[in-house]
Image (cartoon, rainbow, N blue to C red):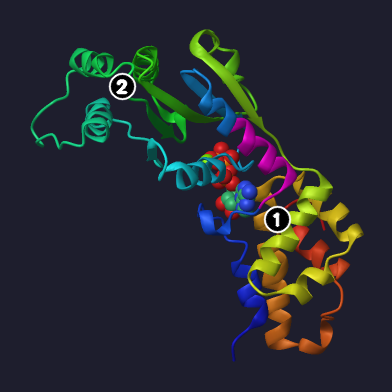
Amino acid sequence: MRSKFEEVKKIFIDSINKDNYVELDSATYNYNLLETSLLKPLKMILLYGRPGTGKSMLLNKLYHNLKEHREIHYFEAPILSEKAFLKEIYESMSGKSVPENMRVNFDGLLKYAQSLRGKREVVFLLDECQLYSEALMEKIRLLSDTRVVKFVITLHKTEDEDIVAKEHFKTRIWEVIVMKNVTEDDLHLYLQKKLIKKGFLEISNMIRKKDIRYIHYMTNGNFRETNKYLYTIFGIYEYYEKNNPKKISTKKLSKKILEMAAIELGYINA
Ligand SMILES: Nc1ncnc2c1ncn2[C@@H]1O[C@H](COP(=O)(O)OP(=O)(O)OP(=O)(O)O)[C@@H](O)[C@H]1O
Ligand SMILES: [Mg+2]
């Protein structure tokens, strides 16, 4: 038998896919900031925030919205080898492919970019830039100085280190967009929209204001944590649905199951 809660659970698997993007006040606000920044003569724009705050999702959305209108390229996964990175940049800009055994010379690439000044503007979206080396970041900055190449980069913030405070990020990155965990209201909208989009209005109606308060308390309004938590909650529902369906109500969320999931994830102790 097809399990309803198994389907619901799957909605909360992390994925970077524009079709799963939901409009929220915070996401829309950041999206608009990002789009406006791209219109300014900035060279680098930084999307910065803790893991799971939606940076990759936003970058992906931006790419799909703009790709028909601008010269824009999206590096979803970081290209860590300098050789491969420069090659990819050159190939994206020139539309030509570089033979396997040939190396793109950095000075040559800079000159090529400079020669396009005033004629073209090429945007590169680079996700996960905390993984790039200092040396490569420096090259990225030099490329952006040509004013032909513009970069939008994401960086995640860790507990122990404020990367943006580092000297080299102060110099040429002119716009920093900070992504944060969301409020209870946005969290509620997030869950409603995700569920309704997949046709589960009745499940969305099970979530009351006080459940949101509890979920927000457990996850701090972090998207990734929320996904993990909801996946676990509906996994427990799935279990009952298969083994003991009388035990679960489909009218409202069970506080007990919310607690069981929180224990399973170590948010609270049993
Ligand atoms: N606006 C949104 N609409 C729908 N889902 C979202 C949205 N923002 C974030 N998510 C969900 O949250 C998950 C985590 O978001 P994302 O991967 O973008 O975070 P991140 O900030 O890039 O994290 P990291 O720093 O670890 O790379 C995504 O897999 C996606 O499922
Ligand atoms: Mg990411």
Q: Which residue is denoted by mark 2 in the rendering?
A: 119
Can residue 50 be seen here? The reply is no
Residue 69 vs 232, above or below: the answer is above
Residue lying furthest right: 210
For label 1, the SS is loop
- Residue 17: x and y, percent? 50, 55
Q: Which residue is denoted by mark 1 in the rendering?
A: 265
Residue type marked 1: Leu
For label 2, the SS is loop
Q: Is residue 30 magenta?
A: yes
Residue type marked 2: Lys
- Residue 107: x and y, percent? 21, 12
Q: Which residues are magenta?
A: 23-34
- Residue 48: x and y, percent? 59, 29
- Residue 242: x and y, percent? 68, 86
Residue lying furthest front: 119
Q: Quadrant of the C terminus?
A: bottom right
User: Closer to the camera: disc 2 or disc 1?
Assistant: 2
Residue 249 vs 92, above or below: the answer is below
Residue 220 vs 190, above or below: the answer is above
- Circle 2: is it few (<14), some (14-19), or many (20+) Cα within 10 Å? few
- Circle 1: is it few (<14), some (14-19), or many (20+) Cα within 10 Å? some
Q: Is residue 161 magenta?
A: no
Q: Viewer-proximal residue, 175 or 40?
A: 40
